[in-house]
Amino acid sequence: MTGAAWVDGLDTVHQVPGRVRLRYAFRPGTPSDESALRRAVEELPGVETARVNRAARSLVVRFDRTATDAGTLCRAITALPVPARPISARTAGAAADPPAAAPGGHAGSVAASLATLVGSFLLPMPLRLPLSLAAALPLLRQGAGIYARDGINSHVLEAAAVSISLARSDVTAANTTLFMLALGEYMEESIARRSDELLKHLLRPSSDEVWVLRDGAETLVPVGTVAVGDSVVVGAGAVIPVDGTVLGGEATVNEAAMTGESAPVAKQRGDAVLSGTLMEEGRLVVYAEQVGSRTAAARIADYVEQSLTVKSEAQLDAARLADRLVPTVLKLAGASWLLTGNWRSAASVLQADYSCALKLATPVAFKSAMYAAGKAGILIKGANALERLAQADTVVFDKTGTLTTGVLQVTDSIAFDRAYGPDDLICLAASVEEHYFHPLAMAVVAAARATHNHHFDHQEVKFIVAHGVASVIDGKRIVVGSRHFIEDDEGIDTSAHRAEIDRLHRDGKTLLFIGFGGVLVGVLALKDSLRPTSAATIARLRRAGVTRVLMLTGDHRDRAAELAAELELDGFHADLLPSDKARILEDMSRDGARIAFVGDGINDAPALAGAHVGIAMQKGADIARLTADVALLEDRIERVADAKEAADAAMALIDRNYRLTVGLNTAILGAAALGFLSPVGTAVLHNGTTIGILLNALRSASSSGSPGIGGR
């Protein structure tokens, strides 16, 4: 079907310089994919933005008048081919934009409808009805078209209300209704668009060109040509274009765009940096580890784009309820007319419906909550992820890098040669490890800096992958690495010290063996430490309604039991393989638990995917962060509690708005049915309350949405 025309029947509804509103219809038998249509139109030459309103079959296009015109655009749109890709479940279930902009839903139409309303009082009587009919004609045409195609909905009710007023020659009611509809839809569209823009502007755009070191010289190249392994030079005032590790230089970096942290962070050799962050002072040479679409900034931009189209169950339920209530409103209008014989009463009832506030307030509240979370360093990938997080009653933590820092520290330095003290042993190892970025090496170098940091001169260092490092000091071979490397590859005997080595293993410590001149001169023991905020985070989660907090780990049972007792966890599982974690979560889910799993490693990806909602730590592996529903943008475990509190606050706000919508609109409908409200009064009250509810839904973007997010 690819290559055939997709859009069938394109009518111009309204046109001003640089902007055109079109009525469209998909050709029968082709996919009705508003998201794909919007993207396809935005790719046409000269198009700046495009917005689609599925309910009204309305397409609004802003374009550069120097590059194209409305006629050319219309011809290009009608020539669009049917998209080749299949419609995904996500796309099929999500509208491209909030249903906001019926005809008149822009500033020009608001002004025109206001002019019509004022003119109806100033013109001679014979001209008032024709003017009102002309102003109402787009709405009446739209209502008839929607009724013929989709049946009764809120737009049909509005058209019916205006028709009744015009039939009774009540031009004041008809024109007031048109003005209130235009004003209300303009406000709704503006609020919905603002919530989208808040999300889209979380990230600072990066430059199109970057400086790299090539053949010893700094060269300015297009950002798209930067490859993994390049040395990228970033100066003051520039945005870091890659994810990587600092090779040289010192600088202060503003990471607010990525972590929400306003205080600049000092960066030097060995520190990690993220794309999208701003260099304030200094100069860095960065080893590029992730480039292009694989950088954190690019992935976050993709997640944000997805979050604008993914709908939650709460949104879908609100939309379904609004649609179900439309026939009820129509029946109430008919009953009111039969009982009172008053067409004004029926017209008043038709002015009020539940659709706008129910369908728009929920997605606006979700997007506002996601924006507030993003500002605080929490990336929530869509409204459904936020909703599932609010539902979670069980939180399961991976241990390493989550409850613990994941950063190794030297805890023991045990010398087996009397020529070396504990500090000497650390400095001996650090002298050859300082050229290596492995976590073990960096921990040893950090420990050496805390001592007198005596440096041992050595020859060239050789890296043996998955084993360790080797060099020569004073004519003797020095090797630093694993037990397998020392014993099997280097032939160094460790049996004399087996009791000490086994004791350190039982304590759950990682061992680094140091051989010098063919003899084992010592062992360094390393261990990661408990995060200082882990206990407080768990307490906050319990206050947020979490009933069970558990830990899964591949670590030794003794160490796991010690940590679980210290944190007062409800249980733990130790000595696990990656598949074991996913199986345990599956068993718990079968028992009815709604699980939020928090992890960071490649081995956590199956569990993150299988949980009710997965949360990935900031320093997690790529696959973990891509699999998770929530990605933390800074390495702070308290952000897990912040995310849970933000989700709870968003759902509470949605629930309040739902009750407000139903309560207020029911009261308005009741008063209108009993004849207490005129069509004008009903229109003012209905649109006014709808705008108020939308503003309430948007407020979390400025008030931050939860105590945890607000309190930095």
Image (cartoon, helix red, strand yellow):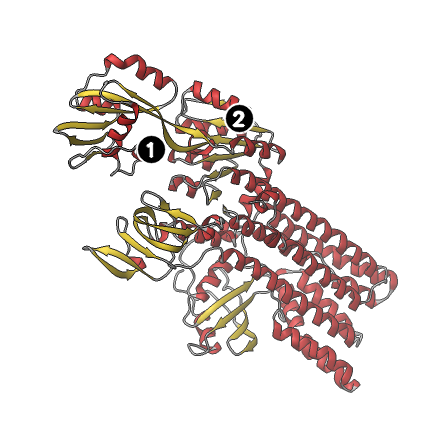
SS class, disc 1:
helix
- In the rendered image, the vertical position of residue 385 relative to residue 327, given as above or below: above
Q: How crowded is mark 1: few (under 14 residues within 10 Å), some or many (20 or more)?
A: many
Say if 437 sits above or below 44 in the image.
Answer: above
Where is residue 132 drawn, in percent x and y?
A: 72, 78
Can residue 647 be seen in the rendering of this structure? no
Residue nearer the viewer, 121 or 263: 263
Q: Residue 327 carries which label?
A: none
Quarter occupied by residue 240: bottom left
Residue 408, x across and y down, in percent:
37, 31
Find the residue positioned furthest to the front: 452
Q: x%, y% of residue 257?
A: 46, 53
Question: Can residue 505 be seen in the rendering of this structure?
Answer: yes
Seen at 41% across and 22% down, the residue is: 575
Q: Nearer the viewer, mark 2 or mark 1?
A: 1
Where is residue 457, by image quadrant?
Answer: top left
The disc labelled 1 sits on which kind of residue? Ala
Relative horizontal placement of residue 704, taking residue 124 as reference (left or right)? left
User: On the image, numbered disc 2 is attached to which residue?
Assistant: 567
Please give the name of the residue rendered at 51% of the width and 32% of the height, measured from the top-left corner.
534
- Please state if 586 lies on the left or on the right of 112 as rendered: left
Disc 1 target residue: 443
